[in-house]
Amino acid sequence: MARTTFASRSYRDDAVVLRTYTLGEADRIVVLLTRDHGQVRAVAKGVRRTTSRFGSRLEPFNVAELQLVSGRNLDIVSQALGKRGYGSAIAADYAKYTAAAAMAEAAEKLTESDDESAAQQYRLLTGALSALARGLHEPGAVLDSYLLRAVSTAGWAPSFTDCARCGAPGPHEAFSAPLGGVVCPACRPPGSAAPDPAVLAHLAALLTGDWERIDAAEPRTGRAAAGIVAAYVQWHLERAVKALNLVERS
């Protein structure tokens, strides 16, 4: 049997760094969301040394073109070329940083076993990080819009107009995260929330990316919508997004 060569196990891809873990004295494990290979966990050897050839390219929220070598348990980063360094601008602002941390945590959970939508998730995340770094919109709104789009891409698109259970035309007053959005009186389960119509309109704008409407929303409307987004996302992920507890809301 011919031996597998280093070159045959090597591949290139663009990736955004979701998270890093310390490994030994000088190495790190990096959790990556790649454009073409889904979620990848890899070792960056020597990255913690001041002489590291990787520099800051493998810090969270940065996007790089990577050369990786496939391994049995973890791949190995052999080369990293910086493409978009969002990390510095995001880390300099607490509101941006906590929003980005929540997005990265959600992206990691959404792509753990979902390779089919990974390319779309990659584009969604890098677009949201770009908006955060450039300060295009309020960080909490960027986060909420990203979360709704990300879970929709994963197959859990919410309905904010027609009944999520029977399809009865809306608008409807009640909202049920387990049922997938607003529900009509006939389908409404006990204990369903009854958001203000302005909140439901804001949620619909977040989902479609209607930034003119989003940016004009009252702060209290944004805060109420954020609570619904958090409940909806975490219900369908079946686990908590811990970084959401750190996000500041204006």
Image (cartoon, rainbow, N blue to C red):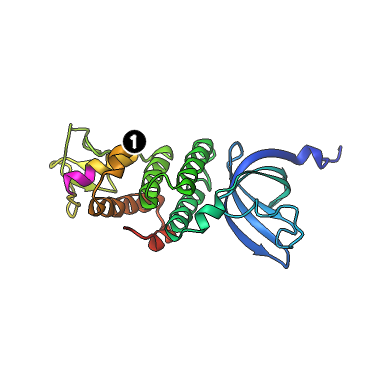
Task: Work out whether residue 223 or residue 168 is closer to the camera in this orientation and state it.
Answer: 223
Q: Residue furthest left?
A: 185
Residue at x-position 75% and y-position 53%: 53
User: How far from the left and from the top, in percent, is residue 31?
Assistant: 60, 52
Residue 32 visible in the picture: yes
- Residue labelled with disc 1: 208
Residue 158 visible in the picture: no
Residue at x-position 45% and y-position 58%: 98
User: How far from the left and from the top, in percent, is residue 141?
Assistant: 35, 48
Task: Tell whether position 199 is magenta.
Answer: yes
User: How far from the left and from the top, in percent, is residue 227?
Assistant: 29, 55
Magenta-drawn segment = 196-200
Task: Work out whether residue 191 or residue 158 is closer to the camera in this orientation and state it.
Answer: 158
| Element marked by disc 1 | helix
* Secondary structure that dominates the magenta span: helix
Q: Is residue 110 left or right of residue 191?
A: right
Residue at x-position 22% and y-position 33%: 167
Which residue type carries mark 1? Thr
Please identify the quadrant where the C terminus is shown: bottom left
User: How far from the left and from the top, in percent, is residue 187?
Assistant: 17, 42
Residue 95 vertical position relative to residue 170 in the rendered view, above or below: below
